[in-house]
Image: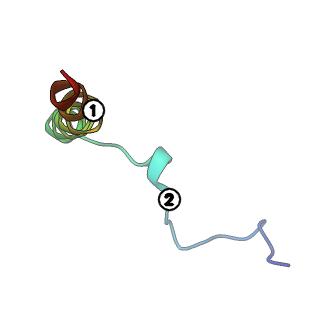
Amino acid sequence: MADDTGTDGGRTTAPMSEFTNGQGAIGVAVLVIGLALAFGVPLALAT
């Protein structure tokens, strides 16, 4: 079992990392495109 009490060289996990507004906007755009592909295309083809 790993020892979680020591230092890890200053590394952080992704949820702890800071991000810019531009990176957040890209994430939202990817989410919208993904939702459109996952739900919009099948709904459009079903009609």
Image coordinates of residue 27 in percent, x first then y, are: 24, 39
Residue at the right extreme, as displayed: 1
Left or right, 13 with respect to 45, comes to right
Local SS, label 2: loop
Q: Which mark is residue 35?
A: 1
Q: Residues within 10 Å of mark 2 (few under 14, many from 20)?
A: few
Placement of 19 over or under 47, stated as above or below: below
- The residue to which callout 2 is attached is 12
In the image, which is nearer the foreground, mark 1 or mark 2? Answer: 1
What amino acid is at disc 1?
Leu
Where, quadrant-wise, is the N terminus in this rendering? bottom right
Left or right, 24 with respect to 5, comes to left
Local SS, label 1: helix
Q: Residues within 10 Å of mark 1 (few under 14, many from 20)?
A: few
Q: Residue at x 81, y 74 (%)?
A: 3
> Could you say which quadrant of the image residue 37 lies in?
top left
> Distance of mark 1 from mark 2, alpha carbons?
29 Å
Residue at the front extreme, as displayed: 47
> Could you say which quadrant of the image residue 29 lies in?
top left
What amino acid is at disc 2?
Thr
Image coordinates of residue 34 in percent, x first then y, are: 25, 39
Image coordinates of residue 17 in percent, x first then y, are: 41, 49
Placement of 34 over or under 5, stated as above or below: above
Give 11 or 41, whichever is nearer the viewer: 41
Image coordinates of residue 13 in percent, x first then y, are: 51, 57
Residue at the bottom extreme, as displayed: 1
Give 36 or 6, whichever is nearer the viewer: 36
Q: Residue at x 19, y 42 (%)?
A: 23
